[in-house]
Image (cartoon, rainbow, N blue to C red):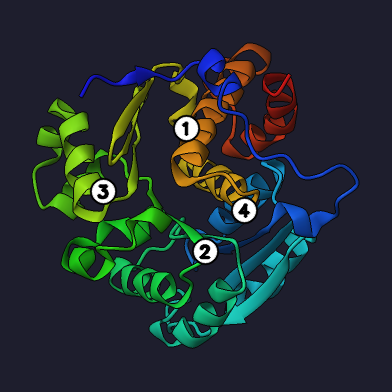
Amino acid sequence: MTPTPLTPDLLAGWPLPAPPPGSDKDARGRALVVAGGAQTPGAAVLAGIAALRAGAGKLQMAAATPWAQALAFALPEARVVPVAATAEGEIAAGAARTLNKLAARSDAVVVGPGMMDDAVACPLAARMVAAAPLAAFVLDAGAVTGLAPLLTRLAGKGEQLVLTPHAGEMAAVLEIDKDRVLADPIDAGRRLSDALGAVVVMKGQVTHILAPDRCWVHEGGVEGLGTSGSGDVLAGLIGGLLARGAAPAQAACWGVAIHGAAGRRLSGTVGPLGFLAREIAGEVPRLLHDWAR
């Protein structure tokens, strides 16, 4: 399958859902972010801010209890729900019941950024998907790495899913060498997309987005986007677009393209290297406005 280049002109012909004039935040959907832990609590903040910058109307964050209050102060726009934590300060398996209830009341759910224990993150993600059949999901980082034994459990749920692995995470899911993924990222992404019927964002400086019947390629990435937290922002952007009502393939394509365009802007204003992941989301509202004209 020959990939279609992801360009502003293509996206202009594929406009995002727009809320009716005069509508309130409920019309732009509720996003839930399940992310972070003792070592990387800021991942939840990066993903959450990105979801709001993408236009989600409401934001909820589930946080391991020891970090919930700090995250509530760091992101006052969000409702922060404390959930069960492990002794190491990560979100625990015992959080499943609370997370399932939150997911069932959400339009879009982002799971995995900054979650270090994939043996917990992946089963939690699978349970939330089952508990929230009307929600769309972004599975990232810790919610992707350990998915190999859960693929059959998620089969048939693919219409709800966007997965955002980098090469190392993809290698873990497919149980193959990372070099094999790097040699043919389209084949790797296609294998996972076909296994689940899901949208897969195969991340890299050249990013491939694979849906069951289509493939797009984005070549507008910049070197500076290869920085800590950048993937958390991308996951949040896609989640925010899903909350607004975009279909999974559309949210993935727009999220990747806007993320890349934000990086290009920061390369010009800050420098080609050294801009921070926390700065990416600030470029998004203007880009979305400009590209929607």
The residue to which callout 1 is attached is 253
**Residue type, mark 1 in image:** Cys
Amino acid beneath label 3: Glu
CA separation in Å, label 4 and label 1: 15 Å
Amino acid at circle 2: Ala
Label pair 2/4, CB-CB below 8 angstroms: no
Whether residue 230 is visible to the viewer of this picture, yes or no, is no
> What residue is shown with label 3?
169
Q: Split into 4 quadrants, where in the image is the C terminus?
A: top right
Give the alpha-carbon distance from disc 4 to disc 3, as whole Å.
25 Å
Q: Are marks 2 and 3 in contact (CB under 8 Å)?
A: no
Closer mark to the observer between disc 3 and disc 1: 1
Foreground label between 2 and 3: 2
Q: Earlier in the sequence, mark 2 or mark 3?
A: 2
- Say which residue label 4 marks: 243
Residue at the image point whose x is 18% and y is 67% from the top? 152
